[in-house]
Amino acid sequence: MSPRQITVLGECVADAFAEPASTSNELALRVLPGGGPANTAVALARLGTPARFLARLSGDVFGRLFRAHLEASGVDLSSAVQAAEPSTLAVAELDAQGQAAFSFHAQGTADWQWTAEELARVDLSEAACVHTGSLALVREPGAAAVEDFLAAAAPQATISIDPNVRPLLVHPDVYRARLAHWCALTDVLRLSEDDLELLLPGTPPEQACDIWHAAGARLVVITRGAGGVLASFDGERIQVPAVATRVVDTVGAGDSFTAGLLHHLGARGLLGGRLAELRLDDVAEACRFAVRVAALTCSVAGPNPPWQSQLAQLATADGV
């Protein structure tokens, strides 16, 4: 079965990584197109899902980089807004384990200026799923318009949200205040163990899942890096181990996992409503696929998710 379209809404960020410079008083930056929602759209398209990206893309040098990158990966930009504001810049510092800490330059940038009029023009008749999250749901002035867009989309499309908490830009209290409302809108809630600690400090993952189920989310998936995945579907739980890989960095791994999860569910015709046909075995299979996608992303520098052909090569090598 060919997967139906997935529409992704959110930011595209210039991820700048420090590299050795020719002199001690210089800093060389290698800039890659990133941003959680953009990474997810790219990963979906590379896996073979028709992926449309709702973005506000600047006309500056970074915006042109974003557009070229997205189009080269097969992402549909027909509904993207050509924005007058500048692009968002994130400067990443990597630790010895490849974990990235970001500092953001995001004041007044294009990604957060969504209006109700811009989103009202979007045709969702072909979309099986709408995925969003990260800063688009919390950065003003556009956050309220994005929430209203999700509410309008929910009757016809599966809703997926990844909070992707960024405490340097938005205080976690803002996420906490809105999370119950997001759960009432969403069918799939995917978040990392770091997000969990920021949103519900000290809460066991299983208890957190029950809290979010009670608020409305049917499928909750918590990724734990090398610790694998906890998935809870209407309170039924499964654990899926991580795939061993040589980690270059973890940038974009969570976004790739989300794309793998949604791609796998969509390819089996399980998206497009309230997950009425979904079973726990389907969740386990989708998570096993998604951890492979995330592992391949970790094995290369920056947010560079794998193509479908690379996954096929990995499956052949593993004897799958």
Image (cartoon, rainbow, N blue to C red):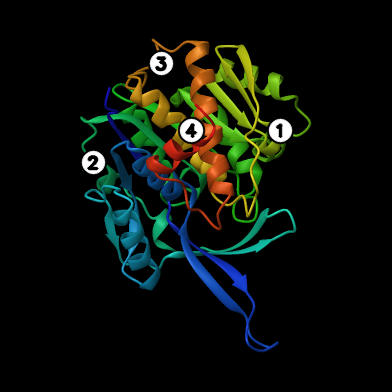
Where is mark 4, residue-wise?
315
Tell me if 52 is positioned left or right of 165 in this view.
left
Any mark on residue 227, and which?
1
- Label 4 amino acid? Ala
Q: Residue furthest right?
A: 202
Residues at marks 2 and 3 touching, judged by CB atoms closer than 8 Å: no
**Of callouts 3 and 1, which one flags the residue occurring earlier in the amino acid sequence?**
1
Judge whether residue 89 can be spotted in this image: yes
Q: Residue at x 63, y 82 (%)?
A: 21
* Element marked by disc 1: helix
Task: Report how many numbered discs are placed on residues in the image.
Answer: 4
**Of callouts 4 and 1, which one flags the residue occurring earlier in the amino acid sequence?**
1
Where is mark 3, residue-wise?
275
- Label 1 amino acid? Gly
Residues at marks 3 and 1 touching, judged by CB atoms closer than 8 Å: no
Residues at marks 4 and 3 touching, judged by CB atoms closer than 8 Å: no
- The spot of residue 14 in percent (x, y) is 47, 63
Where is mark 2, residue-wise?
122
Please tell me how crowded label 4 is: few (under 14), some (14-19), or many (20+) other residues with Cα within 10 Å: few
Q: Which quarter of the rendering shows the N terminus?
A: top left
- The spot of residue 208 in percent (x, y) is 67, 23
As displayed, is residue 214 above or below residue 11? above
**Mark whose residue sits in front, 4 or 3:** 4
